[in-house]
Amino acid sequence: MERLVPTPSLGVIPERDSGKPLILDIHGLGIDFGGLHAVEDFTLLIGHTEIAGLIGPNGAGKTTVFNLITSVYQPTRGVILFDGYDTRGKRPDEVCRMGIARTFQNIRLFKDMSVLDNVLVGMHNHVQYSMLSAFLHTPSYHRKEKEARDKAMELLSLFDMQHMAKWQAGSLPYGAQRRLEIVRALATEPKLLLLDEPAAGMNPAETAELMQNIRSIRDRFGIAILLIEHDMSLVMGICEGIAVLNYGKIIAKGSPEQIRNNPTVIEAYLGKQEA
Amino acid sequence: MEQMKKKLHLGKTNREKVTTFGLVIALYVFVEILQRTGNLSNLMRGQLVPICAYMIMALSLNLTVGILGELSLGHAGFVSIGAFTGVTVASLLRPVVSQNWILFVIALVAGGTLAGIVGFLIGIPVLRLRGDYLAIVTLAFGEIVKSLVNNLYIGFDQNGIHFAFLHDTLNLAEGGKKIIAGPMGATTIPKVSTFLAGVLLVLFCLYFLYRLLGSKMGRAIKAMRDNSIAAESVGINITRYKLTAFTMSAFMAGMGGVLFGLNYSSIIAGKFNVDLSILILVFVVLGGLGNLRGSIIAAGVLTVLPELLRSLRDYRMLAYSIVLIAIMLITNNQILVQWWTQRKKDLKNMFTRLRKSGQGGEG
Ligand SMILES: Nc1ncnc2c1ncn2[C@@H]1O[C@H](COP(=O)(O)OP(=O)(O)OP(=O)(O)O)[C@@H](O)[C@H]1O
Ligand SMILES: [Mg+2]
């Protein structure tokens, strides 16, 4: 595992990413729901090819952080810089086009569509032909559609899901649905991939395989990954940097080793898990 | 076997396309034969163009309600705009355009375009609303269009076109002609709609919708209906696609209106009311949301049915309602649907077995 080095603005990222600008630079982020400070003074830095983890007890505000990063919510306070650009005021679809893709804790597939179509929808902004050529079925339409399908099949093969291409997405087994969400997110060609509890509902064997997959996705596409997960074997196994959230506030940041031995974290979260 | 069940029959869409086009063409040929051999009653003959118009209206509303998943109760408004625009344009151009079909096509484009533009403008604020609110606002839209057209006066003379609102202040010169006369409606319409034109227009709309569904835009629209939050998360601009689909739907409804309007010698705004909007919605719901062939069949059957039931006299509407309820029960009944799928599967298995045993015999 890579050594972590300090960055100019408090926080650590993997050493190999230190020469490049940060992919994600969040400062003093906060959001209130009525009187509840769901997230407060949240600060996080992620390197260009880092696998980072966001952990914490139920209701800590982890998913809310994802919703803030993807502009599903607009922050009450704070700044999110993605690849140097402010995401403030952007719509979720614009944020996606900037290069952030995500999966959902409560799976949100296009259930009535085929597995292949789910991936093709993910590729929407990269399949380029005019509506006119779609109506006339010009050679360029056929070529672009075929290229898209080939690429979609290739992405599905990352998880050995090619044979499921024609199945209805809603009828997939639970684990496959989670994997399909990742494939769909990858189809948008992101620079940052946000995974909200990707191993939820998976058995240990599936989780181990998922770990391998996440790592190989990072290596193959050279992207950054931020994941929320309650399964500590996965988090400790693949994350380089980890942030721990409790009641909307960050209570610790560091390498897996540091987090595992942090008394505050053990007190607030890990202790309960391992007891 | 378990896996077989999970497979979507993607070949299905292709087959559906072919059978739907085939159905419309076969219907046309059938009706033409009836007509040539003198086996079509006058009443039925009068229904031919309206049936095509209803099919187009149903297809267009299916785009909004079935495919886009937004409930609209004001579709008659777009039909009305199309009809009166088409009638106005056709009346104005009648003296200069001698070919009926050219007149029809120009009116069609004009009616569709104006309905499309209005659909776009209405869509901007309206599509932000959800569910019930959208239904209420579109309902109001339909009524507003009705009232506006009801108070509209258009005429022309050697000095050009004249418009008036609320009161007939057109003051046309000698030899001038009124095209739309407020509540009296349009009264001297060039009847240039034909059954063939109607069938071709139905085929065009089908072609357009199937191509749309087979494109990336169609996928985006289906995805939005399925899960709009997820669609946004993969970079789909929801507002833009909703607006585009709604505009296309309005355009198509407008064309249906032109076909409808140019089939009669006179039409009044009051005919394009809530009842019409609901009728179109009934076609779409009975035919199946998102099911284009269903829309066509429902529009056809439910328009012909009252005529066929005429012999029942006073009980006609009663029988009509019973048929409606029966269709609804049948198409939405889970047990019946399951029974039918099972039968289909049995039949298919039987055929595969037969084919296999046939091959075995040969080998
Ligand atoms: N849209 C909202 N309106 C009001 N309160 C909200 C909203 N979204 C989240 N919350 C609240 O914010 C808090 C944080 O929720 P969040 O879903 O981010 O937790 P989480 O860390 O993802 O938890 P879990 O591990 O259970 O997924 C919770 O108290 C939740 O009830
Ligand atoms: Mg959560």
Image: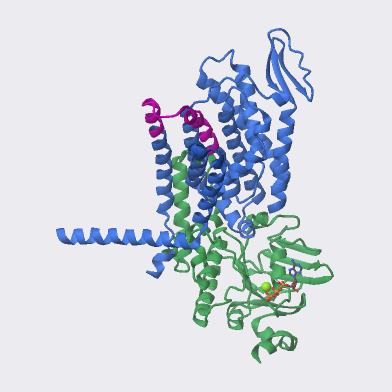
Chain colours: A green, B blue
Query: Is residue A240 left or right of B293 when viewed as pictured?
Result: right
Q: Which residues are magenta?
A: B30-55
Magenta highlight on residue B52 = yes
Question: Residue B223's x, y, as percent?
Answer: 57, 55
Question: Residue A83's x, y, as percent?
Answer: 68, 60
Q: Is residue B259 above or below residue A9?
A: above
Split into quadrants, the picture shows ligand 1 in the one at bottom right
Magenta highlight on residue B359 = no
Q: Residue furthest bottom?
A: A275
Q: Is residue B2 above or below residue B303?
A: below
Query: Viewer-proximal residue, B256 or B306?
Result: B306
Q: Residue furthest top?
A: B174
Query: Is residue B302 left or right of B241 when viewed as pictured?
Result: left
Query: Is residue A232 left or right of B296 when viewed as pictured?
Result: right
Q: Quadrant of residue B254?
A: top right
Looking at the figure, which quarter contains the N terminus of chain A?
A: bottom right
Residue drawn at (58%, 83%) of the image: A233
Question: Residue B326's x, y, as percent?
Answer: 51, 52
Question: Residue B219's x, y, as percent?
Answer: 54, 51
Q: Residue furthest right?
A: A35
Residue drawn at (64%, 20%) of the image: B187
Query: Viewer-proximal residue, A22 or A144?
Result: A144
Query: Viewer-proximal residue, B55 or A213?
Result: B55
* Residue B235 visible (yes or no): yes
